[in-house]
Amino acid sequence: MPVHDLGRLVSEAAKFLGDELMKMGERLRPLTAHYYAARYPNAARRLGISYTREVAEACLEAMRELWSILRPHLRP
């Protein structure tokens, strides 16, 4: 069954990639709500999400940090 919860995915991946990724878990966990808000109608309203420039920048920064950790482990 697919998993979309970033906190859970980070916990699983950290078993293979180490503590650096595990430390990101709390920063990435809130991004799961943004996934649901983008995917399902009315989810943003139900989850109480409103988008501002600051919210977008925080999400992008978290993802940039995640990619900087994951990129060395990806095959070209």
Image (cartoon, grey):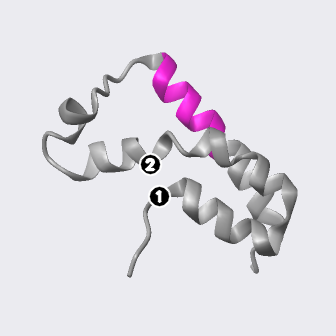
User: Residue 71 got which mark?
Assistant: none
User: Residue 5 got which mark?
Assistant: 1
In the rendered image, the quadrant that contains the N terminus is bottom left
The prevailing secondary structure element of the residues shown in magenta is helix
Residue 61: name its quadrant: top right
Task: Please state the extent of the stretch shown in magenta in the rendering.
Answer: 54-63
Q: Earlier in the sequence, mark 2 or mark 1?
A: 1
The reply to whether dot 2 and dot 1 touch (C-beta < 8 Å) is yes
**Residue 65, horizontal then vertical, whole percent:** 73, 44
**Residue 54, horizontal then vertical, whole percent:** 50, 17
Q: Please name the residue shown 85% across and 64% down the image.
A: 18
**Which residue position holds label 2?**
32
For residue 21, side relative to residue 46 (left or right): right
In depth, the one of 25 and 34 nearer the eye is 25
Name the amino acid, label 1.
Answer: Asp
Q: Compute the Cα span from label 2 to label 1.
A: 5 Å
Q: Please name the residue shown 67% across and 44% down the image.
A: 64
For residue 7, side relative to residue 64 (left or right): left
For residue 40, side relative to residue 56 (left or right): left
In depth, the one of 43 and 71 nearer the eye is 43
Q: Please name the residue shown 56% across and 61% down the image.
A: 8
